[in-house]
């Protein structure tokens, strides 16, 4: 990405951005006009369900077959001709390299054909900005981004000014859900299923140790190991009979860890505007714990609707919109990165 005089005719009003997201197992496209969503299309990839996780090679292939129909449908839903698009924003990283390359190659070709700029976007920045898709949120705010690959507490001072205050030293919160689900024999992604079973379970029945991590740092690998140890000691009958309670107890400890770290972030920064983003933000236990904190602790809480928690291209197009408005674009030589710091 570079800050440089633009070679393109730059549009300052009525900016239309096409966003492309392909960092993991969702092929997504969206069109935003002046930051407002005209169309948002997401194609999931059922192909991974029996593997307990995303298989990178299968994900790249699924993106390849999905990307053209998904963009086509997005254009149709938005009801605008391709010629009205001012720039194409795409996820540059972090993510699975093969998957990222499908999205970036498509975005570059599309932009080249229309002689418009491409805008590489950081996926994690996109998750934080997903909060602005539906809410009028005043900066600064704190955002807990919890997804399948990341767990971060971010301080957002402006759309393009963010700082990671703390993150996980090992597994992400979503991974903790997915790996536990795999041990229970549930299909990928296991997070939503654990959430469903947990709703009918007793969260106090099983005890899982909370990791002792300093400040705003997270760790979930020890928790996962204690989960595996508990479940492996059970007979299949015992496991089935206790499924709801196992899920409820496990989910409760994850939510507890996330909330206690958020409380540290609020106390350290003095910022009480608190948001969550990323796939795990769809978790009903986390959502209600946050609403509870809003009542008890006086936080001002912001939670995206479900479809903007999980990966989508509206958040990428919105990031692209802010970059475009600041005169920041990329070029055809930009490369994708599996790891990309915020
Ligand atoms: O943000 P996302 O769609 O993709 C990544 O960037 O990783 O997040 C996917 C993650 C998966 O680990 C999935 O199990 C988890 O979000 N997830 C949930 C729920 N819905 C999705 N975890 C717990 N409860 C849910 N309801
Ligand atoms: Zn994500």
Image (cartoon, rainbow, N blue to C red):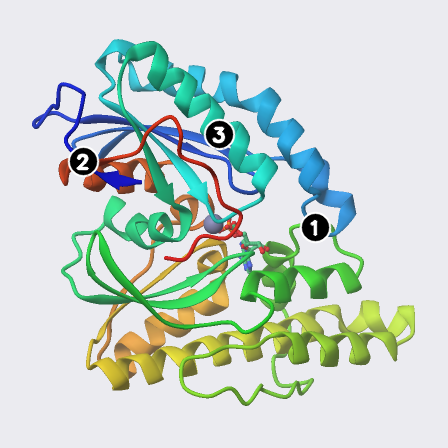
Task: Pick the quarter of the image with the C terminus.
Answer: bottom left
Circle 2 is placed at which residue position? Answer: 4
In the drawing, does residue 140 fall left or right of residue 334?
left
Residue 104 image position (x, y, % from top left): 46, 30
For label 1, the SS is: loop
Res 10 → quadrant = top left
User: Are the two marked residues, 1 and 2, in contact with CB atoms closer than 8 angstroms?
Assistant: no
Q: Please, which residue is most extreme toward the left here?
A: 13
Q: Is residue 13 above or below residue 226?
A: above
Taking the image as shown, residue 315 lies to the left or right of residue 298, namely right
Residue toward you, 307 or 176: 176
Whole-angstrom CA distance, mark 3 to mark 1, is 21 Å
Q: CA distance from mark 2 to mark 3?
A: 24 Å
- Residue closest to the eye, 75 or 335: 335
- The local secondary structure at tag 3 comes to helix
Residue 126 appears at what percent x and percent y?
A: 35, 47
Asked if residue 262 shows in the view, the reply is yes
State ligand 1's quadrant.
Answer: bottom right
The number of discs equals 3
Mark 3 sits near ligand 2, with its Cβ under 8 Å away: no
Residue at x-position 36% and y-position 29% = 30
Mark 2 burial class by Cα count in 10 Å: few <14, some 14-19, many 20+: few
Q: Residue at x 40, y 29 (%)?
A: 333
Image quarter of residue 194: bottom right
Q: 107 or 309: which is nearer to us? A: 107
Q: Which residue is mark 3?
A: 103
Asked whether the residues under the numbered discs 3 and 1 touch, taking CB atoms below 8 Å apart as contact, a structural biologist would say no
Q: Quadrant of the N terminus?
A: top left
The first of marks 3 and 1 along the sequence is 1
Give me the disc on residue 53: 1
How far apart are the two marked residues, 1 and 2, measured between alpha carbons?
40 Å
């Amino acid at each position: 990405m570079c800050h440089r005089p633009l070679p393109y005719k730059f549009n300052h009003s009525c900016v239309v951005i096409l966003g492309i997201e392909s960092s993991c197992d969702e092929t997504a496209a969206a069109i935003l006009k002046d930051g407002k969503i005209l169309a948002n299309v997401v194609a999931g990839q059922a192909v991974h369900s029996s593997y307990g996780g995303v298989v990178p090679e299968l994900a790249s292939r699924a993106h390849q077959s999905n990307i053209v129909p998904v963009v086509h449908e997005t254009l149709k839903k938005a009801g605008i001709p391709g010629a009205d698009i001012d720039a194409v924003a795409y996820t540059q990283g972090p993510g699975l390299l093969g998957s990222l390359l499908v999205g970036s190659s498509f975005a570059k070709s599309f932009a080249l054909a229309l002689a418009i700029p491409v805008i590489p976007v950081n996926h994690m920045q996109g998750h934080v900005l997903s909060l602005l898709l539906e809410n009028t949120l005043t900066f600064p705010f704190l955002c807990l981004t919890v997804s399948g690959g990341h767990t971060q507490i971010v301080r957002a001072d402006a759309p393009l000014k963010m700082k990671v205050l703390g993150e996980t030293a090992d597994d992400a919160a979503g991974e903790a859900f997915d790996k536990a689900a795999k041990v229970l024999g549930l299909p990928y992604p296991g997070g939503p299923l654990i959430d469903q079973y947990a709703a009918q379970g007793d969260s106090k029945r099983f005890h899982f140790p909370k990791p002792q991590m300093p400040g705003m740092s997270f760790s979930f690998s020890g928790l996962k190991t204690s989960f595996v140890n508990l479940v492996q000691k059970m007979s299949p009958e015992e496991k089935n009979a206790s499924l709801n309670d196992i899920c409820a107890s496990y989910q409760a400890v994850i939510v507890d860890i996330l909330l206690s770290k958020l409380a540290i972030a609020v106390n350290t920064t003095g910022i009480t505007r608190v948001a969550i983003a990323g796939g795990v933000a769809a978790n009903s236990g986390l959502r209600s714990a946050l609403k509870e904190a809003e009542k008890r602790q006086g936080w001002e809480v912001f939670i995206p609707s479900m479809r903007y928690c999980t990966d989508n291209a509206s958040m990428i197009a919105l990031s692209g919109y802010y970059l475009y408005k600041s005169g920041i674009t990329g070029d055809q030589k930009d490369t994708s990165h599996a790891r990309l710091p915020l």
